[in-house]
Amino acid sequence: MRLSLSIFLMLTLMMLSSAALAQSEPQDERPTQQVDEKPWRKKTDKDGEKTRQKSVRATQKTYASMARALLGDPHWSERFWRLLEDETPKIAIHPFKAEDLPIPLPEAQAYVEGLSTALVAQSKGRYAIVGRQELGAVVDEIHQIGTRTESVNPLGELMDRARSDLLAVGHLALQKDWVVLSYKLVETESGRIVSTAQGRFKRSQGEVAANVTGLSLKGAAVQAARKLLRDASKLDYVMVQGLRYQTSGVHTAFGRYFMEMLSDEFRKVAASGPRNINNLSLSDFVVEEEQFRGLKLAKSQTLEENQLGSDAGRYLIKGTYWVLADHIEIRLTLFQTGGASVSWRGRVLRSEIPEDLTLVPPPAPIEEADSRPLGPIDLYLSSNKGENPQYKVGEEMTLMVRAGEEAHLACYYVQADGAIFRIFPNRFMTADKLSGGFVQHIPAAGMPFAFEFAPPRGVEAVKCYATDRDVSSRIIPQTVKAAFEPLPQKNERELTKLYRSLSDVTLSEASLIVTVH
């Protein structure tokens, strides 16, 4: 046993000596090939293509989901069921306008084309899709006759002229690096919304990248004043209607601050510029009662256009601003009698804006996508301070409503807290029937009530509905019989749903966003 143990120890010592000798010998200095222990971490062109294809498939899936939601199984009217049996219904897709978009128009059109392709695929021959190009001539014709997005009901005009059975109306919003695309499918005969859809799309880095250069607020006001006064053919009097947040119709502290600064620059440039316009006058846009008493507006004419009159030197200025990642993009338009206009667009660095100025207002009681005129009856809604006005506490509001054809009218006021009141018809104004082209003033002259604003301040709204027949016996029992009393509906959406549920009624809607400060 001792002998075996000795041999084991000797063998162990010999092995250790051999290992030490091997380490002391010179090693082969030829470079050895490095082996990547985690080859799956490498990015190849093939992997990049797979990622791109995956993104494309996700985008197509979103388009297909939206198309199915629009064409699936909505609450169609009896008329549309008959269309399905007799002929191929036509669906027109309403095109976007550059001034209503937070992104470039070509980029927005790519989303429209993507949805159009998905609609064609999902329709499987049941519907005929009328795309942007086919509607181009119709839209141009509408603009030529004076129907503009910010005035009367362009969707109703488009429905009538496009001769389609359904109209897909889109709304595009920007949420950081994402585009949110919403669509509603509207039946052209009744104006009823029969289905809705929404999708989110990730923007590419190239689309998101923005130029970090920009103007100061002072620099933007100076540049805008010089450009607008230079391009205006003749200018004696300017009515200032305000700078609103995007397409919401809401006025903010930032908008009021900038327009005051712009008005000051107008005066300075007009007095000292090369044209030496010493007699330039500026004022807020306000229509006094004696000016609109008995007023008749042409079909495509707005209250603002009427107040400009025939004097070529009278202008109206208004605009919108868009909150981007590093900038505030300001868009201003100076309108002249006859529809002529000059515009200015510029970007202000967000770092140049005082922190106490409100940029993004609280949400309006009516969602932005639902606040635009809708329906085949040409319904126009404005006020003594124009469309989407702003009032100070203590000021009074007078509404102006016009229907393009004989119709029955009902109007409601939506407070910032969501409470809803019927304001027309009421015990002072019981007749709800309007003749075509007639302008209804609410309150009318001599009426013993007024809309005087009191605290709290905030964003409120007016919502009006025009129908081709009297529906008061079907609506009022489900709301409240007396006007100026809170309705049981929790918000405007519930009230609108009630009107849209009237399947045998032609309906149009118009809204007015009201800012109280």
Image (cartoon, rainbow, N blue to C red):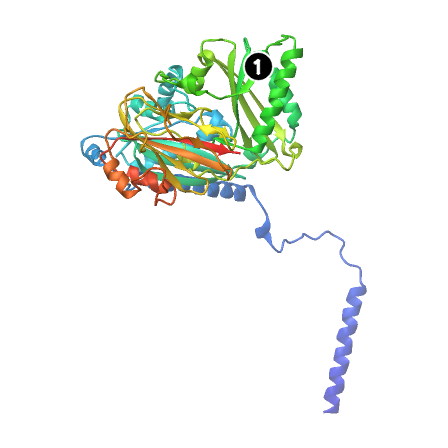
Q: Is residue 460 above or below residue 305?
A: below
Tell me the quarter of the image containing the N terminus: bottom right
**Farthest residue, direction bottom:** 1
Q: Is residue 99 above or below residue 296?
A: below
Q: Is residue 2 left or right of residue 87?
A: right
Q: Is there any visible trace of residue 268 in the rendered image?
A: yes
Where is residue 169 drawn, in percent x and y?
37, 31
Name the spot of residue 472 as percent of width and height, x first: 25, 35
In the displayed structure image, the side of residue 365 where residue 41 appears, left or right: right
Q: Which residue is label 1 attached to? A: 281
Give 459 or 152, whichever is nearer the viewer. 459
Left or right: 360 in relation to 438: right
Q: Secondary structure at mark 1?
A: strand
Of 76 and 340, which appears nearest the observer?
A: 340
Which residue corresponds to the image point at 45% horizontal and 30% vertical from the top-left?
110
How packed mark 1 is, by other alpha carbons closer than 10 Å (few <14, some 14-19, many 20 or more), is some
Residue type indicated by callout 1: Ser
Left or right: 242 in relation to 16: left
Compared with 417, 317 (above or below) is above
At 66% across and 23% down in the image, what residue appears? Answer: 219
Judging depth in this view, the residue of 334 and 257 nearest the camera is 257
Residue 506 percent coordinates (x, y): 26, 30
Q: Quadrant of residue 133?
A: top left
Q: Residue at x 55, y 19 (%)?
A: 283
Q: Position of residue 152 (x, y in %)?
A: 38, 23
Vertical arrangement, residue 205 with respect to residue 25, above or below: above
Task: Work out whether residue 358 or residue 446 is closer to the camera in this orientation and state it.
Answer: 446
